[in-house]
Image (cartoon, grey):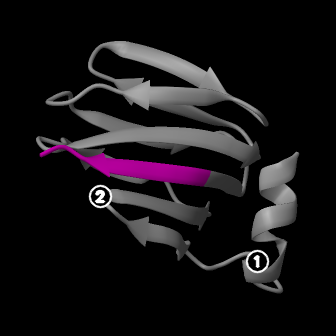
């Protein structure tokens, strides 16, 4: 997994209490973040940002509108604009790459 090699220098020594976010890239309307979470991600809606999620470790359920998608290591999902979504952790810790692309 290339992403694991890329984010290795930014990984905290132990899992966070809550959520750890490290911005890997923030240029030209693209933001890529390493996110390590021990808590569910509350519901949100994006009006101008396309969001995607790539799970590196752990398991979660992405609830997008009325659809529930289970993701484990290597799982990837694009989240549509204007759609309420939240993430429920199924393992104690989930490590993921979250990407936002700002639409112009």
Label 1 element class: loop
Q: Which mark is residue 11?
A: 1
Q: Position of residue 64 (x, y in %)?
A: 34, 24
Residue 7: name its quadrant: bottom right
Q: Nearer the viewer, residue 22 or 18?
A: 22
Residue at 37 percent of width and 41 percent of height? 51
Q: Position of residue 11 (x, y in %)?
A: 76, 77
As drawn, the residue found furthest toward the front would be 28
| First reached walking from the N terminus: tag 1 or tag 2 | 1
Compared across the picture, whether 90 is left or right of 84 comes to right
- Say which of marks 1 and 2 sits in front: 2
Residue indicated by mark 2: 29
Magenta span has 94? no
Residue 74: name its quadrant: top right
Image quarter in which the N terminus is found? top right
Compared across the picture, whether 28 is left or right of 16 comes to left
Residue at 75 percent of width and 47 percent of height? 56
Q: Position of residue 84 (x, y in %)?
A: 21, 32
Q: Position of residue 20 (x, y in %)?
A: 56, 75
Q: Which residues are magenta?
A: 97-104
């Amino acid at each position: 997994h290339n992403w694991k090699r890329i984010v290795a220098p930014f990984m905290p020594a132990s899992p966070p209490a809550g959520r750890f976010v490290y911005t890997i890239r923030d240029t030209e309307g693209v933001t890529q973040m390493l996110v390590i979470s021990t808590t569910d991600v509350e519901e949100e809606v994006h009006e101008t940002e396309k969001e995607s999620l790539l799970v590196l470790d752990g398991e979660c359920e992405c609830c997008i509108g009325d659809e529930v998608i289970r993701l484990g290591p290597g799982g990837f999902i694009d989240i549509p604009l204007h759609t309420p979504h939240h993430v429920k952790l199924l393992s104690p810790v989930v490590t993921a790459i979250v990407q936002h692309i700002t639409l112009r």
